Image (spheres, helix red, strand yellow):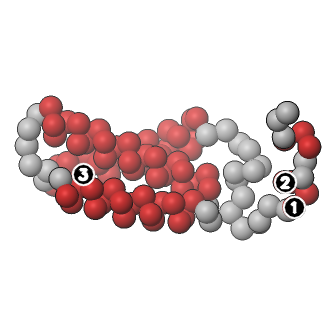
Amino acid sequence: MTQTLACSFVMGLAIGFLTTKFFKLVLVIGTSIIGSFGIVIAVAIFFPHYLDTPDLVAWCILAVVFSFVQYFGTAHGDSRYDRIEQPMNDEEFDDEDSYRS
């Protein structure tokens, strides 16, 4: 249980750092990895067994499949989130239409 907590903490820090650089891509991949890990752990809880190589393989396959589903199926194109190398300009922050009254 302690290893799971430590893994969650380290992954959270890593994904949080990378999210500041690559917003959309990291969110899609990060949520896919975390979600597939949750599914593998849930299966291990309902069908008690030690985590082994088949669980790791299932985790990797689910993470890849969920990443493709999120990126190509549910992630909508938005210029604010599709930037990898171009930082946002100050004019985009000052747009009055984006503020809520």
The residue identified by callout 1 is 90
Tag 2's secondary structure? helix
Q: Earlier in the sequence, mark 2 or mark 3?
A: 3
Q: Nearer the viewer, residue 16 or 86?
A: 16
Q: Residue 36, image x and y in percent?
A: 34, 43
Residue 63 visible in the shown view = no
Quadrant of res 47: top left
Residue type at tag 1: Asp
Q: Residue 57 carries which label?
A: 3
Q: Which mark is residue 93?
A: 2
In the rendered image, the vertical position of residue 73 relative to residue 81, given as above or below: above
**Cα distance in 3D space between marks 2 and 1:** 5 Å
In the rendered image, the vertical position of residue 78 relative to residue 19, given as above or below: above
Q: Which residue is at 16% across, 40% downward?
A: 44
Q: Which of marks 2 and 3 is in front?
A: 2
Q: Which residue is at 70% across, 53% downward?
A: 82
Residue type at tag 3: Val
Q: Nearer the viewer, residue 62 or 32?
A: 32
Residue type at tag 2: Phe
Q: Which residue is at 15% across, 32% downward?
A: 46
In the rendered image, the vertical position of residue 4 relative to residue 85, given as above or below: above
- CB contact under 8 Å: marks 2 and 1: yes
